[in-house]
Amino acid sequence: MAKETGRKNIAQNRRARHEYDILDTYEAGVVLTGTEVKSLRMGRASLVDGFAQIENGEVWLHAVHIPEYTEGTWTNHAPRRKRKLLLHRDEIEKLVGKTKEGGLTLVPLALYWKDGRAKIEIALARGRKSYDKRHALAEKDAKREMSRIMGRQAKGRFS
């Protein structure tokens, strides 16, 4: 059997980009059990309520939902258990310093397969206030409208 190559998305946290200002992103490996891997191979996971914390010099992923494997038996995993993330020591030390500043948190952005291994993209993020969210939406709509107008002009329609 040929080895997997490339990146294949399992789950994305679209809400995180709306709720937070993303300052920096990191790619981390995830320590999983057998039934979790099989469930992820079926493409089932939810990152919506997830967050990461640093405990005793290790990074742990909390509240990420990987549903139980349907064909599993008594060896099935708990769907929302905390999972260890694999990062380099210098990355962890940098994250410790930045999260202790206050107002910064670690949120998962995407869960994916990379060359046959489960990886998660976590972001160092600052929470947005409601007026910041409205401003970001207005800015996004303005950019979309500008690109629409530019596309029409490129096609020769000036309406």
Image (spheres, rainbow, N blue to C red):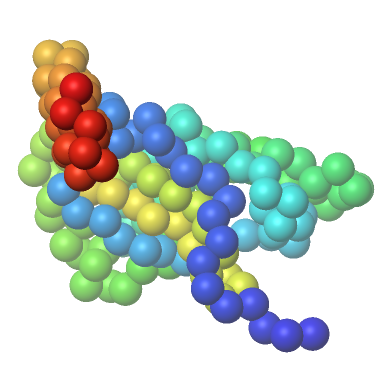
Q: Would residue 148 appear left or right of 131 to someone viewing this image?
A: right
Say which residue appears at 70% left-offset and 39% top-offset. Answer: 67
Q: Would residue 79 appear left or right of 58 to someone viewing this image?
A: right
Is residue 102 in view? yes
**Furthest-front residue in view?**
156
Residue 106 screen position, x and y as percent: 29, 44
Q: Would residue 20 appear left or right of 54 to someone viewing this image?
A: left
Residue 102 screen position, x and y as percent: 11, 37
Say which residue appears at 56% left-offset and 37% top-offset. Answer: 46
The picture quadrant where one finds residue 139 is: top left
The picture quadrant where one finds residue 87 is: bottom left
Residue 56 screen position, x and y as percent: 33, 57
Q: Is residue 28 above or below residue 52?
A: below
Say which residue appears at 62% left-offset and 60% top-offset. Answer: 32
Say which residue appears at 41% left-offset and 64% top-offset. Answer: 28
- Given residues 27 and 86, the one toward you in this image is 27
**Furthest-bottom residue in view?**
2
